[in-house]
Image (spheres, rainbow, N blue to C red):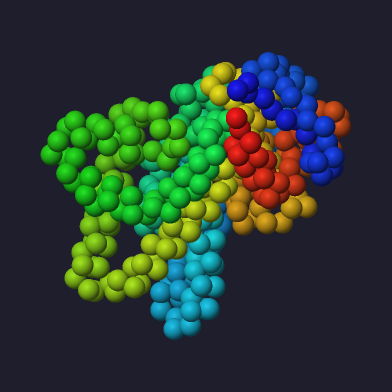
Amino acid sequence: MTPSLSLDLRAHDRTPDHALPPVRVKLSEITDDKAMLRAVVELTRDLNTPNPRIYWSDLLLSAAVGYAGLAVAMTVGSVGWALFAAVVAILGLYRAGMFIHEVSHIKHSALPGFRLGFNLVVGVPLLVPSFMYEGVHNLHHNKTRYGTVEDPEYLPLAHMKPWTLPLFLVSSILAPVALLFRYAVLTPVSLLFPRMRATLIERYSSLAINPQFRRRQPEDEAAVRWRWLELACSLWSITLVALVVSGVFPLAMFAIALGVASGVYVLNQVRTLVAHLWDNDGETMTVTAQYLDTVNVPPPALLPVLWAPVGLRYHALHHLLPSVPYHALNEAHHRLIATLAPDSPYHTSNYAGLPGLVARLVRSTMLRR
């Protein structure tokens, strides 16, 4: 099947999809729009500095809401209130967990201690330490790797079999158990078997969706940080298992905690499904083509605040400006919208919301011959 991209040239003004004739353009044939790229750089020069107060307060408040919701869900007697609290916990912990994306991009000298804070507050407790994304996500932003077999975060989902999407979602439900097993069992056992250790690092130490991706061994400072974080996750996992087996931590509460964790990973997997159009099948692309294969869901859409938090509602713009902190992306978007001509490719990657994006992806897979 020939890879193609349906360019919605009026996506900015929210024209219904069914009213637009599809414009089929092969991604690898799209050239860079120099006017757009120049404007992106020139209009955002003053937006590159992260605000520590915003980062710390957002992370800590999101985590506090998430853990409070989890505590209520595990202890309240009413099923209705427990479900409500579980939803609050999922949304709070999901937002806090999404700061792993910022950790992989920020200059740590500009936010001293933030990576450690993230790992203490969210990374280790949820078994998603920052090393699982650092050194991985940056490959997704590599101009020659994006959308290719060397991209750890890309699959041509729009061209895959109909059963791919359900499997993609179902796998995230089991993520908490898989991570618990990885750190409680595989980590200590791998220390005794070098080959197993190498495989664990290559294949089971990355937040990646490309099954062909193989991670390199960490080096220098990254290797030291990796060892300490993995040790912390391993001790935490073993402690959790021991507390449940001994009856100190009731099994029912543990099951609720796993359910909330599964909800966090499922929500992230849904967001991943619509983060891109997934229309490339392995060819290299220009920066403009990569932008057009990625998604913004700007205001007036409201729900992206919940399912695409911490700047991820401007995912396409983030691919143009990976160094701009999440709290500045909204301002960058408004400047570009106000400046760029109506026929600029920038307007093409702005979509109305989740339902239309999911429907588009489902149509691409379900109608595939």
Is residue 217 at least partly visible in the picture? yes
Residue 112: horizontal and vertical position, in percent?
A: 46, 45
The single residue placed furthest to the bottom in the displayed view is 77
Q: Does 73 sit left or right of 337 as displayed? A: left
> What residue do we see at 45% from left, 63% from top?
260
Q: How many marks?
A: 0
The residue closer to the viewer here, 161 or 238, is: 161
The answer to whether 328 is drawn above or below residue 75 in the figure is above
The answer to whether 133 is drawn above or below residue 233 in the figure is above
Residue 132: horizontal and vertical position, in percent?
A: 39, 41
The answer to whether 113 is drawn above or below residue 39 in the figure is below
> What residue do we see at 41% from left, 74% from top?
74
The single residue placed furthest to the front in the displayed view is 369
Q: Quadrant of the N terminus?
A: top right
Residue 218 figure quarter: top left
Q: Does 365 sit left or right of 191 as displayed? A: right
> What residue do we see at 78% from left, 34% from top?
8
Residue 330 figure quarter: top right
Residue 251 figure quarter: bottom left
Residue 90: horizontal and vertical position, in percent?
A: 50, 62
> What residue do we see at 50% from left, 66% from top?
89
Residue 367: horizontal and vertical position, in percent?
A: 63, 36
Is residue 117 at least partly visible in the picture? no
Q: Quadrant of the C terminus?
A: top right
